[in-house]
Image (cartoon, rainbow, N blue to C red):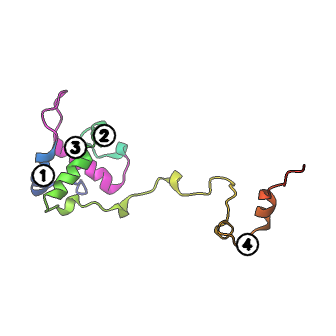
Amino acid sequence: MSDLYWLGDEVWAVIEPHLPHGEPGARRVDDRRVISGILHILKSGCRWRDAPPEYGPRTTLYNRYNRWALRGIWRRLFEQVAGTGGVPDELAIDATHVKVHRSAGGGKRGKRLRRSAARAVGGRARSTRWLTLSADPSPSS
C-alpha cells in the first residue's frame, strides 16, 4: 500500500535515543515499525482494528500506545525531542485532524433548567417559565 506512513531515517535518528531500553519483560518487537503504525493510526484517524497488517498485530500497536501513555513515555519522548530544537515535520502535532466520536457531538443532554446570564447579574429574566419554576415560595408562618 502506498498510503502507509513510515518513519524516515532522519526522524528515527532523532527518536530512537529517547526510547526506553533495558526494561524487564519480553523483548519488544521492532520499535520503528510499531511507532510508524501508531503514528499512522493517529494521523489517519482510523480505528485500531483497521490498522494495516504491515505494521504488525493491531493489539501490539494499541497495547504499546496505551501502556506508554499510562507510563508517560509519550509525553517524555515529545518533551525530549522538542528540547533538542530541530523537530522534524513528521513529528509536529496538529489537532485539527482529530475526529470527534459520534457520541461526543455536544447535545443538550436532556432538559436542564439553566439560569440566564442576565438574571445571574441582576438583570431581568428572559423567560417567564424560569420565573414560575424557580420561584422560591416564602415560608408561611
The residue at which mark 3 appears reads as 34
Q: Earlier in the sequence, mark 1 or mark 3?
A: 1
From the viewer's perspective, is the residue at label 3 or at label 4 nearer?
4
Q: Position of residue 65 (x, y in %)?
A: 29, 42
Residue flagged by tag 4: what amino acid is it?
Arg
Cβ–Cβ below 8 Å for labels 3 and 4? Answer: no
User: How far, Cα to Cα, is label 3 from label 4?
Assistant: 60 Å
Residue 125 position by quadrant: bottom right
- Under circle 4, the secondary element is loop
From the viewer's perspective, is the residue at label 2 or at label 4 nearer?
4
Q: Earlier in the sequence, mark 4 or mark 1?
A: 1
User: How far, Cα to Cα, is label 2 from label 4?
Assistant: 58 Å
Left or right, residue 15 beside residue 133 = left
Left or right, residue 100 beside residue 46 = right
From the viewer's perspective, is the residue at label 2 or at label 1 nearer?
1
- Residue at 47% x, 53% y is 101
Residue flagged by tag 3: what amino acid is it?
Val
What is the residue that sits farthest to the top in this orientation?
A: 25
Q: Earlier in the sequence, mark 2 or mark 4?
A: 2
The answer to whether one can see residue 64 in this image is yes
User: How far, Cα to Cα, is label 4 from label 1?
Assistant: 62 Å
From the viewer's perspective, is the residue at label 4 or at label 1 nearer?
4
The residue at which mark 4 appears reads as 124
The residue at which mark 2 appears reads as 58
> Magenta stretch?
20-47
Magenta includes 93?
no
The residue at which mark 1 appears reads as 12
User: How far, Cα to Cα, is label 2 from label 3?
Assistant: 9 Å
Q: Which of 17 and 123 lies nearest the eye of the viewer?
A: 123
